[in-house]
Image (cartoon, coloured by chain):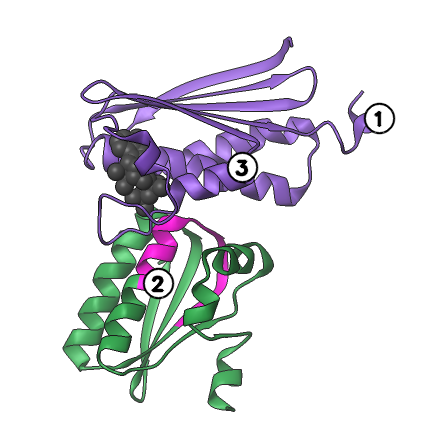
Amino acid sequence: MNVKNYVRFEFQSLPENVAFARACVAAFAAQLDCTLDAIEEIKLVVSEAVSNSIIHGYGNRPNEKVVVAASIFDDRTLEIIVEDYGSGIKDVEKAIQPTFSSDPARMGLGFTFMKSFMDEMEILSKPGEGTSVRLKRSFFAKDKEAYA
Amino acid sequence: MDLDLKLVRNTLVVKVQGELDMLIADKMRYEVDKKLEENNIKNLIINLEKVNFIDSSGLGVIIGRYKKISAVNGRMYIVGARPPVEKILHFSGINKLIPMYSSEQDIINI
Ligand SMILES: Nc1ncnc2c1ncn2[C@@H]1O[C@H](COP(=O)(O)OP(=O)(O)O)[C@@H](O)[C@H]1O
Ligand SMILES: [Mg+2]
């Protein structure tokens, strides 16, 4: 599949930037002419992944770097990648279990949302090196002719 | 201000505005707990009428407050959640723990 459009941006690991990141990806995804519901879901998954980088990856340290990339493929697939260079995840299988959280005050629903609202979720992580979350969702069923 | 707290008799009413993510969630946790403790309040209403986005950090503060409130046998309600927010509240199952109403008036009437 060919990339039809692509954006990539990085920002400081500050809570203020979570809204910025999800709004950017949502604006980019709007090019897919998908439903408003789908845009809301995209905002949510970006918010979850970026919050995870700041909270878990960097333990809320404000001077670190988060990278977000998004691509639209010519079959109307959207791919989102969120990357940090933080603590990494020791046991990814365990981390993605619904309601698992390493922080008792949190809900452990971030990965569950990402998995539920996207078609594919892939996590590459190495303790001490960081985490890359790749999410994919296809929109080919709807509005095909409108997009052509 | 994206957070408005007011005391109505023995209930703290919290109005949130905007996007309830980790930024507002931390502030909300702090402000609500402070107000509950200062005034020895047991009941809490969270008004989400003006909230257009919520993620799991937002859900976390709500559930956390619910645990506190139920530990002292208080009552807690969620009010005014609009469809996109309501969908996430349902998805997380919060609606099974915390009663949801369309307006503050509806609670007063029950
Ligand atoms: N970017 C990350 N870096 C390090 N650990 C992470 C990262 N993302 C997720 N995790 C780990 O996976 C767990 C589950 O994440 P999630 O489902 O979003 O739940 P929550 O954020 O509520 O803990 C987290 O508690 C954390 O231990
Ligand atoms: Mg999370």
Q: Write down the colour of chain B.
A: green
* Mark 1 element type: helix
In the image as oriented, which residue stretches furthest toward the right? A145
Q: In this view, does B14 lie above or below A70?
A: below
**Residue range of the region highlighted in magenta in the rendering:** B46-63
Residue A53 appears anywhere in the view: no
Q: Disc 3 designates what residue? A: A42
* Mark 2 element type: helix
- The residues tagged by marks 3 and 2 sit, at their Cα atoms, a distance apart of 22 Å
Q: Find residue B62 and name its label.
A: 2
Q: Are marks 3 and 1 in contact (CB under 8 Å)?
A: no
Q: Find residue A7 and name its label.
A: none
**Residue B100 lies in the magenta-colored region:** no
Specify few, some or many for label 2: CA neighbours under 10 Å numbering under 14, 14-19, or 20 or more: some
Q: Find residue A145 and name its label.
A: 1
Residue B48 at x, y = what percent?
46, 64
Asked whether, in this view, residue A2 is left or right of residue B64, the answer is right
In the image as oriented, which residue stretches furthest toward the top? A2
Q: Who's the residue at 52% across and 91% down the image?
A: B109
Which residue occupies the foreground of this view, B45 or A130? A130
